[in-house]
Amino acid sequence: MDYHERVHKVLRRIKNAEQNSPFHENIKLIAVSKMVTSTQIAELYKLGCTAFGENKIQSLDEKCKELYTLSIEWHFIGRLQTNKINRLIELNPALIHSCDSLELALEINKRVKERRLDVLLQINSAREDTKAGVLPESALKTYEEILKNCPKLNLKGVMSIGAHTEDISVIQKSFETTREIYERVMSLGAKYCSMGMSGDFELAIKCGANIIRLGSVLFK
């Protein structure tokens, strides 16, 4: 299957999932390019994929330089270490999906100089030790604290990763938890509910995602 066929197959699946979702959200697709080359990114760009997500600062830096002639919207989706914050600020991604604590938000805010950065609060809705993010019961308070104490950040919504299990009902519950939090912070200006990856994006859309992050289903 070539890229053209693969992309259009994914877009059809997204459209079908949208039509079957009670939320009627317009879905934004982020192509996760962390394991592919700049040449492969350029191929998908030609097919209309303009937003790409990277999970490592060095890789994002390199690909920004290699693809500077393309109007790519870069997203940072990986765990952010404090010693990499300054470099990420310099790269100025369109959206940082992985602000996983008030402490990290405060540290980013402290280092931003001239412009505001768009970020999402990461929720550990699956309650898994291997995942970063605030627990659901702390999410609203943390969201409000970031809004109050981080004027250099534009807090745009929430992000989560579905539960790591074969049990669809457990995955669905983790997505529903994130969506419930998103609905509570919409009154605080939230616009984005980022959840769903290659193996579960249709379920995420059903549960109310409006940003999905797809890698292997596009590139492999």
Image: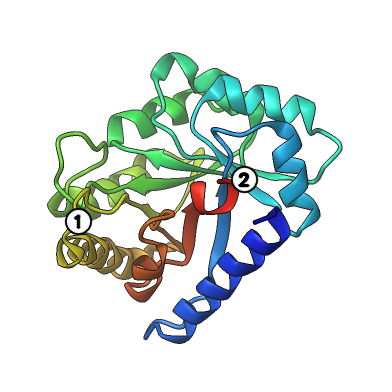
Q: Residue at x 49, y 32 (%)?
A: 55
What separation in Å lies between label 2 and label 1 (alpha carbons)? Answer: 27 Å
User: Tag 2: residue type?
Assistant: Phe
Taking 167 as reference, is 45 above or below it?
above
Q: Is residue 187 visible?
A: no
Q: Residue 126's x, y, as percent?
A: 18, 51
- Is 143 left or right of 79, judged from the image as shown? left
| Numbered mark located on residue 52 in the image | 2
| Numbered mark located on residue 166 in the image | 1
| Numbered mark located on residue 101 in the image | none
Taking 141 as reference, is 186 above or below it?
below
> What SS does tag 1 mark?
loop
Task: Depth check: give the residue in front, 129 or 82.
Answer: 129
Q: Residue at x 22, y 43 (%)?
A: 134
- Is 3 left or right of 205, judged from the image as shown? right
Q: Residue at x 41, y 62 (%)?
A: 201
Q: Which mark is in front, 2 or 1?
A: 1
Q: Residue 133's x, y, as percent?
A: 26, 40
Task: Depth check: give the residue in front, 162 or 81.
Answer: 162
Taking 134 as reference, is 50 above or below it?
below
Outermost residue on the top side: it is 83
Q: Is residue 170 visible?
A: yes
Taking 69 as reference, is 12 above or below it?
below
- Is 173 left or right of 98, judged from the image as shown? left
The N terminus: image quadrant: bottom right
Q: Residue at x 37, y 86 (%)?
A: 22
> What SS does tag 2 mark?
strand
Q: Mark 2 or mark 1: name the one nearer the start of the chain.
A: 2
User: Tag 1: residue type?
Assistant: Glu
